[in-house]
Image: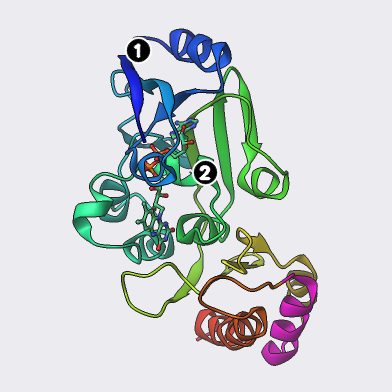
Amino acid sequence: MKAKSFQRVSSFEEAYKLVKESPRNKIVGGGLWLKKGGMDVDILIDLSQLGLDKIEDKKDYVEVGAMVTQREFEQSKLIPEMAREAVKAIMGPGFRNVATIGGSVYGKYGFSDVVTGLLGYKVDLVFYPEAVVSLCEYVKKPGFFDGILTHIRIYKENLKGFFKKVGITALDYPIINVSVTKGKEYRVAVGSRPLVGARCEKAEAYLNEGGKDFAKAAEIAVEELNFGDSISTKGDYKKQLALTYVRRGLEEVNK
Ligand SMILES: Cc1cc2nc3c(=O)[nH]c(=O)nc-3n(C[C@H](O)[C@H](O)[C@H](O)COP(=O)(O)OP(=O)(O)OC[C@H]3O[C@@H](n4cnc5c(N)ncnc54)[C@H](O)[C@@H]3O)c2cc1C
């Protein structure tokens, strides 16, 4: 990536004005994916002076600023355990000290461990200018939201959670990732198919209506999702892995 200039903005208004001026002006979080993408950028817009580096307890939810790093996220006791596990599965601590939660969620990368982990919770994304969108809706819609992601809100729930990333090595992109939570209801999500994480709504309905056969629930889950080939793996293999880990996740959250 080559950037012609770098601007540390002092307001959301200023940042948004720059974003709207040109598609070649880009918000920078940790800059890791921007750098890997190799795209030429006119202005890198830095949000680091806008107070987005905090994780705050807001009574009904925990609010995470977009500039919070993955490392701060995984170390915070305010963040639910399974979401922290999902983030800990990414690269090494040096990498996670730089990568931001905002860049990770906004980018909704197909392989994202962050998105699959967060789909186990009720999560809202807060954008400037004024918009609040659920993470489920955000990942379902093609394209990106026209705005600046300022915060993510993770609602407090009493949940048991399971997260699994399968990769060739610990430092690899996932072949598949799976999250399962059980609280008042079940949530099941599978990502890196190679498409971005998605909730398995039919499997969840089966379970939430009292279905107890976890192997059957896993079958329903993999049949309602699409699996395709990626550079390292065939779609059929991803599907088999998902089948196994959805079932194991359901067993785990029911112990
Ligand atoms: C080598 C490598 C390996 C990786 N492996 C994994 C892995 O195994 N699992 C995994 O889950 N992830 C992985 N990732 C992705 C990584 O975890 C981060 O999600 C990614 O780097 C984006 O975070 P960032 O802070 O670097 O974002 P940036 O690169 O700064 O930004 C990414 C995109 O989001 C936009 N953006 C950033 N912040 C905002 C905002 N607040 N509002 C609006 N737009 C914004 C940027 O303009 C850009 O388009 C990997 C990345 C790399 C480079």
Reply yes or no: does residue 209 show up in magenta: no
* Residue 50 in view of the camera: no
Q: Is residue 131 visible?
A: yes
Principal secondary structure, stretch drawn in magenta? helix
**Quarter of the displayed picture in which ligand 1 can be seen:** top left
Q: Nearer the viewer, residue 234 or 79?
A: 234
Task: Using the image, tell me which numbered label, if any, was put on residue 9.
Answer: 1
User: Quadrant location of residue 66?
Assistant: top left
Snapshot colouring: rainbow
Mark 2 crowd level (few <14, some 14–19, many ≥20, 10 Å Cα)? some
Residue 223, magenta (yes or no): yes
Q: Residue at x 34, y 9 (%)?
A: 10
- The amino acid type found where label 2 is placed reads Gly
Against 123, residue 26 (above or below) is above
Q: Which residues lie in the magenta part?
A: 212-226
* Residue 137 picture quarter: top right
Residue under label 2: 107
Q: Residue at x 29, y 18 (%)?
A: 49
**What kind of element bears circle 2?**
helix
Q: CA distance from mark 2 to mark 1?
A: 21 Å
Q: Which mark is residue 232?
A: none
Q: Residues within 10 Å of mark 1 (few under 14, many from 20)?
A: some
Disc 1 marks a residue whose amino acid type is: Val
- Looking at the rendered image, the quarter that the N terminus falls into is top left
> Residue 89, image x and y in percent?
35, 67
Query: Where 26 falls versus 200 (above or below)?
Result: above
Q: Whole-percent x and y of residue 82?
A: 42, 65
Query: Is the CB–ligand 1 distance for label 2 below 8 Å?
Result: yes
Residue at image location 46% in from the left, 75% down from the top = 164
Instruction: Name the foreground residue: 226 vs 115.
Output: 226
Q: Position of residue 216 (x, y in %)?
A: 75, 89
